[in-house]
Image: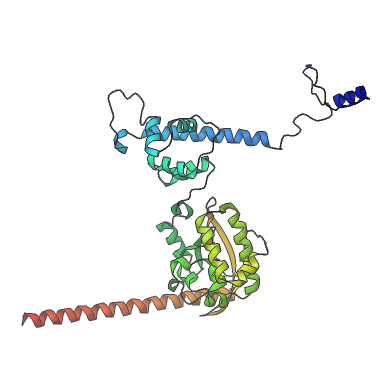
Amino acid sequence: MTTMARETATSAVPARPAATGQDPDPVRPAGAGVAPGAGAASRAGEIRRHELATFLRSRRERITPEQVQLPRGRRRRTPGLRREEVAQLSAVGVTWYTWIEQGRDIQVSEQVLDALARTLLLDTSERAHLFQLAGAVDPTPAAQCAVITPALRQVLTQLEPVPACIQNSRYDILAYNRTYARLMMRDLDTVPPADRNCVLLAYTNAEWRASIVLLDETTRLMAAKLRASMAGHLGEPAWKTLLKRLRAESAEFRENWDRYEVAATRGKTKKFANPYVGLVTVDHTDLWLAPDLGARMVTYPPHDEESRERLEKLHAIVLEAEAEAEAEARAENEDRAGARSRVEAAGAV
């Protein structure tokens, strides 16, 4: 009995394969147990770390000590800054920074990347490149917004009477033309910049909501699109703030958000009850400006001839209102100038 028990226990331990160089388990295919694509992912990570190391080294070598208020010294053989100088200025350990430049497989925090970007005097594009190579999200607000250049504003104006705006992935309205400002309400300019968010307006602004013909369908879809877009920004302060505000101010949003539906951004025919010209049917079209940031130009070309005529009429109303406002401003300036002249003349007597 004792012998049998010992033999059973021994047989339960798998024998080591003989050192023949063959697969110890001929039934299992080679590479089994390794996640699909793991090798490619590892190579991609290695390439990215190498690019990060090379990029940091090139930026370090172009910065002179004088640019960062350091003495040059007599025995400086390294072009630009030394590694220990970059580490010191960035409040990072010398060994840690050396590992980054050596392409070691380490996780670099957003705080360290931010410090390195400041030390190395990186511009906006270089900073974005640094964070992208490190596989990190830049936490600074400036990195979350598309730059609205004068050229983009000119494009928005040239598109009139077609309503158009520029939005980011959070559906913040960053810029817009005059017909867009009056498409879904009497004047978007009256809305504080912090409230110019399509999702927020669709759920909380009575005038904006009144213009949406298919309101229930639209608000439910917008919650699904916001959830899909937010997947790439979990934990970011601006997104958390928007979500918290929407949940606090709209029971309808809470209900739709808790459905856990997702939807992609795509073109669609939309109908708006415009307060100036009545029903307008348009085709929602996106022109992506910076896919990594979600920035896009949204345009609403007319879907039919009647809508085209109504958008032209809306544009004419806008231009007429602007002309009247400019005339009133000129008249006020002339009145003030005349009053000053009379006061000065009276004082000279």
- Residue 313 shows in this picture: yes
Residue 23 lies left or right of residue 137; in this view the side is right
Q: Percent from the top left, x then y, of residue 273? A: 57, 78
The image quarter containing residue 327 is bottom left
Residue 175 lies left or right of residue 243; in this view the side is left
The image quarter containing residue 215 is bottom right
Quarter of the figure that contains the C terminus: bottom left
Numbered-mark total = 0
Residue 217 lies left or right of residue 24; in this view the side is left
Camera-side residue: 281 or 34? 34
In the image, residue 339 sits, relative to residue 120, either above or below, namely below
The image quarter containing residue 229 is bottom right
In the image, residue 181 sits, relative to residue 91, either above or below, namely below
Quarter of the figure that contains the N terminus: top right
Residue 39 lies left or right of residue 146; in this view the side is right
Q: Percent from the top left, x then y, of residue 297? A: 52, 60
Camera-side residue: 207 or 103? 103
Q: Percent from the top left, x then y, of residue 13? A: 83, 26
* Residue drawn 69% across the image and 37% down it: 37
* Residue drawn 43% across the image and 71% down it: 189
Camera-side residue: 135 or 166? 135
- Residue 270 shows in this picture: no
* Residue drawn 64% across the image and 73% down it: 216
